[in-house]
Image (cartoon, rainbow, N blue to C red):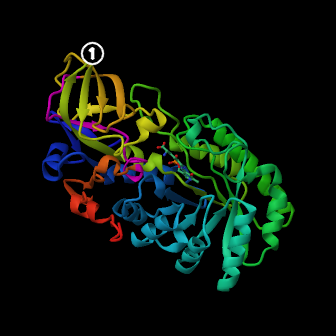
Amino acid sequence: MDHFLYRDGTLFAEDVPIRDIAASVGTPFYVYSCATLTRHYRLFEEALSGLDHLVCFAVKSNGNQAVLAHLAKLGAGMDVVSGGEYRRARAAGVPGERIVFSGVGKTAEEMRLALEGGIRQFNLESEPEMQRLSRVASEMGTIAPVTVRVNPDVDARTHEKIATGKSENKFGIPIARAREVYAEAAALPGLDVIGIDVHIGSQLTDLEPFEIAYEKVAELTRQLRADGHDIRRLDLGGGLGIPYERSNSAPPLPIEYGEVIKRTVGDLDVEVEIEPGRLISGNAGLLVSGVTYVKQGEGRDFLILDAAMNDLIRPAMYGAWHDIIPVEEPAPGVDQTPYDIVGPVCESGDTFAKQRHMPPLAEGDLVAFRSAGAYGAVMASEYNTRPLIPEVLVKDDHFAVIRARPTFDEIIKRDTVPEWL
Ligand code: LLP
């Protein structure tokens, strides 16, 4: 459920008409709803109630500092994967002890940044990374709390580009080697081995892969404890999917996901962390775009929008579906027309949807892409020298621009032409 609904014939974000935001900031833009972010965050809080837990929002899904600050006020921790994300989370007011640092390629500089600023734990993904953190922490005269990410070799049954828990993926250490690697980690100076980390993929629409992975983690917890490690925290990753296509069956709910967690690791007397991104931010955001032209092609009509693949890459990159709806509510029973919905970028991949049935639209009309709050703005680029589009946050009946559209001057000035040219 989200807070983007038609009211009096037009689409609202909470109590703000989308058309008013469009008139004020211009299209295209992203708009996020505080109430929806809150609701989705709380679903996870409820799902884990009764367990000692922390919900760490995956910053990679939506890193705007206003979004992070809003979630942090609700009590969320953050999962970051770069020094940049760490700085963003800190700038948004998140204390270091609520930030976990994931990712396969942490540099010594990133390790130092987090150790200086405060960190809840590093999720380590390889032996060389363990050795480097040991060295960095020892040089700083400090102890780094760590988990090791294990790769459980589980098929997440999702898009191949976002599956991470199979043995051929670059993530984690093979679970079969875990005892050996934990022994090595425990022997390294500067590391405090506190737990286990796992993340098997994103946009999972089936709970079984989670269940299989978490059972393996529970078994490993018992083994490692028997080996003498004080395993007291399990980071179970993110990945629960969202309904992108309203007409399709809905993926499992956070409460059902919570039951899987309780069933598999609930009796281990551990602190549980999860790292959801998409389920919190995805359906809390829309991409709003204007129709630049309606073009009659050979046997098909094109809706040429002012948003493009550089603003929302998911359809071009993963063949992802986003529901696209008109901002002005169509009259009931109005005839639908199939359109190819495209952007202005000069490649055919700049296609959001093919033969999508929509009510008839005309130049200047507004459309909204649903489920665009996760992996939307964060994956945008300035390809074709198209400025990054603004982000807007709505709360009740007011809205604010939380990232402004850069001017062309700002963009042009970023390059330097050497004088010797
Ligand atoms: N934790 C780790 C270690 C991750 O790698 C990810 C996502 C998450 C948590 C959050 O997963 P979520 O709950 O959002 O599914 N760009 C792709 C998604 C890439 C996900 C990468 N890792 C997309 O647009 O579908």
Quarter of the image where one finds residue 164: top right
Dot 1 amino acid type: Glu
Magenta span has 113? no
Residue at image mark 1: 298
Membership of 377 in magenta stretch: yes
Indicate the quadrant containing the N terminus: top left, top right, bottom left or bottom right.
top left
Over which residues does the magenta segment extend?
Answer: 359-379
Relative height, residue 140 to residue 286 (above, below): below
At which x and y percent is residue 162?
Answer: 56, 42
Q: Residue at x 83, y 65 (%)?
A: 183
Q: Is residue 170 left or right of residue 120?
A: right
Of residues 356 and 343, which is closer to you in this image?
Answer: 343
Query: Residue 149 falls in which quadrant of the image?
Result: bottom right
Element marked by disc 1 = loop
Assign the C terminus to one quadrant of the image. bottom left
Furthest residue toward front: 420
* Left or right: 271 as drawn, with respect to 385: right
Kindly give the residue lying farthest to the right in the view shown. Answer: 227
Instruction: Please tell me whether the stretch drawn in magenta is mainly helix, strand or loop.
Output: loop
Q: Quadrant of residue 169?
A: top right
The reply to whether residue 329 is in sight is no
Q: Is residue 92 above or below residue 14?
A: below
The location of residue 190, given as percent across then percent down, is 72, 78
Which residue corresponds to the image point at 24% horizontal and 18% vertical from the top-left?
Answer: 336
Q: Is residue 189 left or right of residue 348?
A: right
| Left or right: where 315 falls relative to 188 | left
How crowded is the residue under tag 1: few (<14 C-alpha within 10 Å), some, or many (20+)? few
